């Protein structure tokens, strides 16, 4: 198997982890959660030399999806056609309100996002030649999804799970019980050796969080 690479580009005042994933040989890969600062992401893409085959969104919050349309336009100007995929369609209302939310938070240049395709539980995507499965993990948002590559032992979990914490559910549409159910039923069974990249802060492993994350005490044993 070719070497698979990942890079993190922190974007927006929320310091959201925009992830670049690509195969080192073919240079083909994906940008996940371009929440803003599209020119910065484009420069990172150019620096790696990667060919962006798709832009993926885990959920509809502005700091994860607000730069998707701008990045798609910038990539097209570079000769790269990158369709936007995800999240689950239950986050459409969030994608439709990104520009308004950006104004509320004083963040310029964020656009409402219109995916080229929605994603659902059980679908499989190809990123740099590696299959990634789609898991629907609601609670933080209704349509939040996670990407998992068994071949790599890697999950991209957005704002579902963090090192030492879990995603916020104190939104009108949040559901704490659903979030814990998703973690218990879909993420923990992936296996302790699985590493994950999350939407904010450092990544971790499923095993480390099973043992030490205080929010998982009642569901991980």
Image: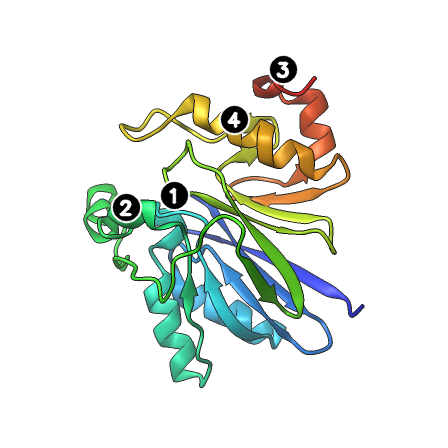
Query: Residue at 46% across / 45% down in the picture?
Result: 15
Q: CA distance from mark 3 to mark 4?
A: 13 Å
Q: Residues within 10 Å of mark 1 (few under 14, many from 20)?
A: many
| Residue 169 pos. (x, y %) | 39, 27
Q: CA distance from mark 2 to mark 4?
A: 22 Å
Vertical comparison of 163 with 154: above or below: above
Q: Which residue is mark 3?
A: 217
| Residue 192 pos. (x, y %) | 75, 34
Q: Which label sits in the foreground, 3 or 4? A: 4
First in sequence: mark 1 vs mark 2: 2
> Is 14 left or right of 193, judged from the image as shown?
left
Say whether marks 1 and 2 touch (CB < 8 Å): yes
Q: CA distance from mark 1 to mark 3?
A: 25 Å
First in sequence: mark 2 vs mark 4: 2
First in sequence: mark 2 vs mark 3: 2
Q: Relative to the observer, which residue lies in front, 5 or 129?
A: 129
> Is 62 left or right of 150, judged from the image as shown?
left
Is residue 205 visible in the rendered image? The answer is: no
Query: Residue at 60% across / 13% down in the picture?
Result: 218
Q: Which label sits in the foreground, 2 or 4? A: 4
Q: Which residue is mark 1?
A: 143
Vertical comparison of 37 with 220: above or below: below
Q: Residues within 10 Å of mark 3 (few under 14, many from 20)?
A: few
Say whether marks 2 and 4 touch (CB < 8 Å): no
Res. 142 image quadrant: top left
Q: Which residue is mark 4?
A: 181
Q: Which residue is mark 2?
A: 94
| Residue 68 pos. (x, y %) | 37, 62
Q: Which label sits in the foreground, 1 or 3? A: 1
Q: Quadrant of the C terminus?
A: top right
| Residue 6 pos. (x, y %) | 65, 59
Q: CA distance from mark 1 to mark 2?
A: 10 Å
């Amino acid at each position: 198997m070719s070497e698979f690479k990942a890079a993190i580009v922190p974007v927006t005042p929320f310091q959201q982890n925009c992830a670049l994933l690509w195969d080192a040989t073919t240079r083909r890969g994906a940008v996940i959660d371009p929440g803003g600062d599209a020119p910065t992401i484009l420069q990172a893409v150019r620096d790696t030399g990667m060919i962006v085959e798709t832009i993926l969104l885990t959920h509809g919050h502005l700091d994860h999806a607000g730069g998707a349309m701008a990045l798609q336009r910038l990539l097209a100007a570079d000769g790269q056609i990158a369709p936007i995929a995800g999240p689950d369609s239950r986050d459409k209302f969030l994608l439709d309100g990104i520009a308004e939310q950006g104004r509320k938070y004083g963040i310029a240049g964020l656009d409402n996002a219109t995916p080229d395709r929605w994603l659902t539980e059980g679908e499989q995507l190809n990123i740099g030649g590696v299959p990634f499965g789609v898991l629907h993990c609601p609670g933080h948002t209704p349509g939040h999804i996670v990407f998992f590559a068994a071949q790599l032992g890697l999950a991209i979990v957005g704002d579902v799970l963090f090192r030492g914490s879990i995603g916020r559910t104190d939104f009108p549409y949040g559901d704490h019980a659903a979030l814990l159910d998703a973690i218990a039923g879909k993420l923990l069974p992936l296996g302790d050796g699985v590493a994950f990249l999350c939407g904010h802060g450092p990544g971790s492993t499923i095993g480390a969080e099973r043992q030490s994350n205080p929010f998982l005490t009642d569901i991980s044993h």
